[in-house]
Amino acid sequence: WLYSGSGLWEKEGEKNGVTVYGLKKPGSTIKKYKAVWLMRSKLSRFVMWASDNTPPDKHSMRREIGLYDLRVIEQHADLRATWSAWKVPFGPYLSPREFVARTQFSQNPVTKKLSYTVTGEPERIPPDACCVRIPHMINIWTVTPLKTGELQVEWFIDMELGGNLPYFAQNVVMPKGLYGFGSRVKLFTEQEKYRNARYDWIQEPDAAPRLTQAAAPANSGS
């Protein structure tokens, strides 16, 4: 198994509108995954949902995965970059996992494609004896506006769960989580509390371009 693999994305399956692909590289026992699906929402709503640090409610991302003890270590005022830590229960007889990560948003001004990157920084704070610290994580969400008015979401995961979890168990668990969680993202983002989400740095695909002061007409009076 260690030396097998094509190094190419191969379709694992499709459920509830979510298509999951896996990638196995020779020399690695743990596969990388990505999930792709379509939904109708706003980019700003996605950002507000993904960066929501309020207590979990019925459709919160945190409640869905059992996340607890969320701590914001550092956060930029515009929310484009945040350093935080959180814990997740991990099933019977297994220690909870602790995530320490930097989350970062960016948008391509031409295509309006939104990127949301979650990068593990396990050494950022001292370890907690309660949990196994996630040793490696690069998760990238790419949200692409389409001409149909829909958003195409691609969720890429390159992660090691650490501890004594066998690699084959992680390779079974990961795609199942992508199917279930991906199909709920639209439900999460369309909650009433995100309806009026607005960010100065986000250009929605159906919005008129913002004029900066330098780009304003000379006779505008500014």
Image: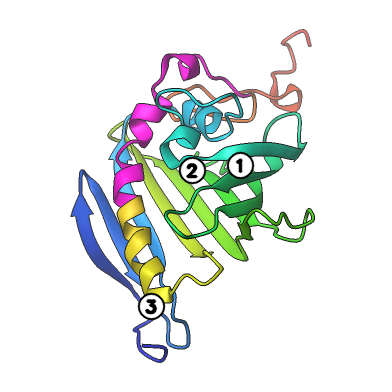
Residue type pointed to by label 1: Phe
Q: Nearer the viewer, mark 2 or mark 1?
A: 1
Mark before the other along the chain sequence, 1 or 3: 3
Determine the residue positioned at 42% across, 52% down. Answer: 155
Q: Quadrant of the N terminus?
A: bottom left
**137 within the magenta span:** no
Quarter of the image for residue 136 reads bottom right
> Looking at numbered disc 2 in the image, what kind of residue is underneath it?
Lys
Q: Position of residue 203 (x, y in %)?
A: 54, 29
Q: Secondary structure at mark 1?
A: strand
Q: Which segment did they paint magenta?
A: 178-199
Q: Quadrant of residue 128?
A: bottom right
Residue 41 visible, this orientation:
no
- Give coordinates of residue 199: x percent, y percent: 61, 24
In the image, which disc is placed on residue 113? 2
Q: Estimate the x, y position of residue 214 in percent, counting from the top left.
A: 76, 27
Residue, x 42% and y 81% (percent of image)? 25
